Image (cartoon, rainbow, N blue to C red):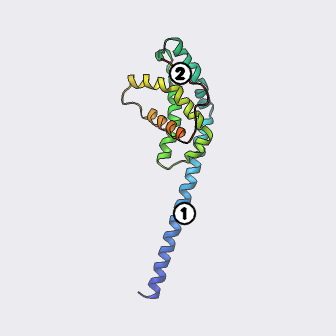
Amino acid sequence: MSLENYIALGGVLLAFGIAIQQGTATRRSNRVSNTLDLLARYLEPEARAARFNVRSHLKLAADEGGNFQILSEAQRAQFASIASLFGLASLLDDKGEIDFQIILASFGDSIVTNFDRLRDYKKWRDSRHPGDNSLWLHFEQAARKAREAGYTSATEVLKVQ
């Protein structure tokens, strides 16, 4: 192989190395951006209200003997909103699209607390909608990851039988 071929090969390898490095930097930047976007969604008024209202909605059902059907669609939609938002974090983590450690540092206890509070509702919902629970499965996975990282339920859990 001639010197010119070695130089050409070196140039190709250098270009390839630069492209890989830029791709890695872009993926890292996207992960940070995706993480910050998700954190912003957690702080939106509707998401905060959903998390805040969980206990009062569950108390309504508990006062009626654990009858979740008495809750309005809007109240149950708040439960689904919590499950989908925290579940989305777990799904994006599995795909390498966010830094889940940042999510956990900000909301680890909240993920566990809300999953524990909604556990009985999840069972009730699963019995009425079998096979339609992917967002709840990801929410459960997020809670499991948070527990494994040492996060716990920050408040008492209201059990609904």
Residues at marks 1 and 2, CA–CA distance in whole angstroms: 46 Å
Residue 115: image location, x then y, percent: 52, 30
Please say if the residues under marks 1 and 2 sit with CB atoms less than 8 Å apart: no
Residue 90: image location, x then y, percent: 50, 41
Q: Secondary structure at mark 1?
A: helix
Residue placed furthest toward the left = 131
Q: Nearer the viewer, residue 65 or 18?
A: 65
* Image quarter of residue 133: top left
Residue at (51, 69) in percent of width and height: 17
Mark toward the start of the polypeptide (1 vs 2): 1
Residue placed furthest toward the bottom = 2
The correct choice, above or below, for 113 with respect to 32 in the image is: above
Residue 67: image location, x then y, percent: 47, 15
Crowdedness near tag 2: few (<14), some (14–19) or many (≥20) residues, C-alpha within 10 Å: some
Q: Secondary structure at mark 2?
A: helix
Q: Nearer the viewer, residue 16 or 63?
A: 63
Crowdedness near tag 1: few (<14), some (14–19) or many (≥20) residues, C-alpha within 10 Å: few
Q: How many marks?
A: 2
Q: Identify the residue under disc 2.
A: 75
Residue 56: image location, x then y, percent: 59, 19
Say which amino acid is labelled 2. Gln
Say which amino acid is labelled 1. Gln
Position of the N terminus by quadrant: bottom left
Q: Identify the residue under disc 1.
A: 22
Residue 99's disc is: none
Residue at (57, 40) in percent of width and height: 150
The correct choice, above or below, for 49 with respect to 97 in the image is: above
